[in-house]
Image: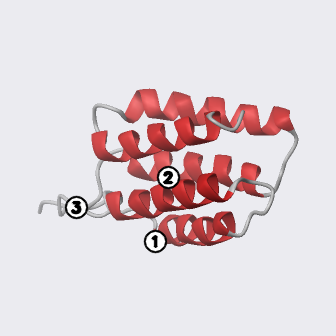
Amino acid sequence: MQEPSSKGEEPDPQVAKDIEELARRLREAEHLEPEVREEAADLLGDLTQALHPPEPHTEELAESTAQLVRAVSDQHEPGLIEAAKERLEEVVIKAETKAPVATDIVLRLIDVLAGIGI
C-alpha cells in the first residue's frame, strides 16, 4: 500500500502562527523606522501566504526567518542577529530552486533589514 504523497509536505501550522505573531510584534517595534516595520511585517505576511500550498524547504526557511526577525524585534546582541542572518542566508541558498516564491520574499526581507544596518 502506498503512502499519500502529501505526507511530510504540510508545513508546521505553528511556524505560520509564529510568523504571523512576529509580524504583529514587528509592527509595534518602536526601535525600527515606521517604513521598515511596515515593509518587513508585510513581507512576513507574504511569507505566511507562500507556505500554502507547501513547497519543499519552506518550513526550514520560515523557521530561520522567524529566528532572525525575533532577534531583531527583541533587540538581541548584534552578534546573535548576525548569526541568525547568516543561518538564514545558508537556508536560502539551499531552498532557492525548490521554493522560489518563499526565498524571493525572504531575500526582500533581508534587503529591508540590510537597509537599516542589520
Proximity of marks 1 and 2: CB atoms separated by less than 8 Å: no
- Judging from the image, what secondary structure is the residue with disc 1 in? helix
The residue indicated by pointer 2 is 62
Q: Quadrant of the N terminus?
A: bottom left
Q: How many marks?
A: 3
Q: CA distance from mark 1 to mark 2?
A: 11 Å
Q: Which residue is mark 3?
A: 6
Q: Position of residue 35 (x, y in %)?
A: 60, 55
- For this rendering, which residue is in front, 14 or 103? 103
| Position of residue 70 in the picture relative to residue 59 (left or right) | right
- Return the residue nearer the eye: 98 or 45: 45
Q: Identify residue for label 1.
A: 13
Kind of residue indicated by mark 3 = Ser
Instruction: Give how far across and how far down residue 15 sits, in percent.
Output: 52, 64
Residue in front for this viewpoint, 27 or 10: 27
Q: Are marks 3 and 1 in contact (CB under 8 Å)?
A: no
Q: Residue furthest left?
A: 1
* Residue for point 46% across, 55% down: 43
For numbered disc 3, what is the local secondary structure? loop
From the viewer's perspective, is 33 left or right of 99? right
